[in-house]
Image (cartoon, rainbow, N blue to C red):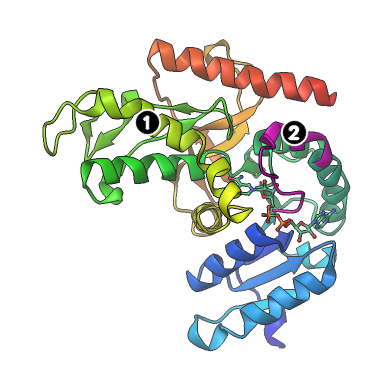
Amino acid sequence: MARQDRPGRKVAVVGAGMVGSSFAYALIINGVARRLALIDRDPDRAAGEAMDLAHSLSFLQPVVVESGGYELCGDADIVVITAGAAQKPGESRLDLTRKNAAIIKKIVPLILTHNPDPIILMVTNPVDILTQVLLQESGLERSRVIGSGTMLDSSRFRHLLSQNCGVDVRNVHAYVVGEHGDSEVLVWSHANLAGAPLSEMCPVCTASCMLGVKQNIDEQVRNAAYKIIRRKSSTNWAIGLAVTRIVETILMDQDSVLTVSALWEGAHGLPSVCFSWPRLVGWQGVKSDLAFPLDPGELEALNASAEVIRDSLEALGS
Ligand code: NAD
């Protein structure tokens, strides 16, 4: 049997640009998939990335890397969509909506022709709106339509808290919920260092600095993408790893709690649209939404964030 025909965990990536190729690199160096397929509107781009990645294989765990058309989605466990226009300096994520929704509507039937029941992971922005467009266009079960959501934002939040408190980021637990975008909500009421709440005081140095630094950290998380894009035109490394974490969780059935985007099923009177929330993720995709009580101010902000997404969907006619 030819190596590329052997069974094993397979991931297909549609969109081999900065984010798609950074994700592909993170995926293979972490040994998460056995087979990786790259698909792009520009086949040379996908082929070039596949060649470059394949040349690193002597240093890695075995993985087959290939490029080609949508037939490569046929036996993929997960299809990751990173195709689309990138955010331009000064352009809000919502400005991209119409452009990228049209691209997604074109891509989805091409995937489903070859694979009627994949898990599809949306990364293209505005990710919550496009996750909902994907859900509507694909007719797939809610659990199998996932957006990368605020995985990146939660990681930025944890990193900044880690820096502020001088504690290993792995001991910092904090989530960003709602839209991956300007209206996102940093959940301070649950932020903690090794279980000790951080809402007003850092338990490590017992300094009550949190009230002063909250606004600064909030601003840095919310505006991180704009600041990076102004300097280097795109963000790619951290999102590549964030998507790898989601894919690993699904392929390895890890039951991890991740702030991914999925359809909200109506609790707390919030609009039933796709946004991020701490969710249990495993082999079937999203297994459940955590019961995660927010304080009244956070709930109000989440409601406002979900309304931003609902308004954009309405403007889009979805
Ligand atoms: P990029 O321009 O480098 O890559 C986009 C790729 O998509 C290109 O290779 C292009 O040829 C391909 N493409 C465009 N239309 C296509 C189509 N119809 N079919 C197949 N391929 C197509 O952009 P990038 O920096 O990789 O960003 C990709 C997307 O990821 C953007 O929407 C960006 O905003 C988003 N992004 C999301 C997050 C997140 O947290 N969700 C983070 C960073 C970037």
Amino acid type shown at disc 1: Asn
Q: Do we see residue 66 in this rendering?
A: yes
Foreground pick, 19 / 62: 19
Label 2, ligand 1: CB separation under 8 Å: no
User: Helix, strand, or loop for circle 1?
Assistant: helix
Which region shows up in magenta?
Answer: 82-99
Circle 2 SS class: helix
Q: Tell me which numbered mark, 1 or 2, is placed earlier along the sequence.
A: 2
**Picture residue at 74% right of the left edge, 33% below the top:** 95
- Give the quarter of the figure containing the C terminus: top right
Q: Taking 236 as reference, is 304 above or below it?
A: above
Q: Is residue 216 above or below residue 52?
A: above
Q: Nearer the viewer, residue 276 or 109?
A: 276
Tally the marks: 2
Q: Foreground: 253 or 197?
A: 197
Residue drawn at (67%, 77%), measured in percent from left and top?
Answer: 65
Q: Amino acid at mark 2?
A: Asp
Residue 160: x, y in percent? Answer: 35, 42
The answer to whether residue 217 is magenta is no
Which image quadrant for residue 297? Answer: top left
Mark 2: few/some/many CA within 10 Å (<14, 14-19, 20+) = some
Q: Quadrant of the N terminus?
A: bottom right
Residue, disc 2: 95
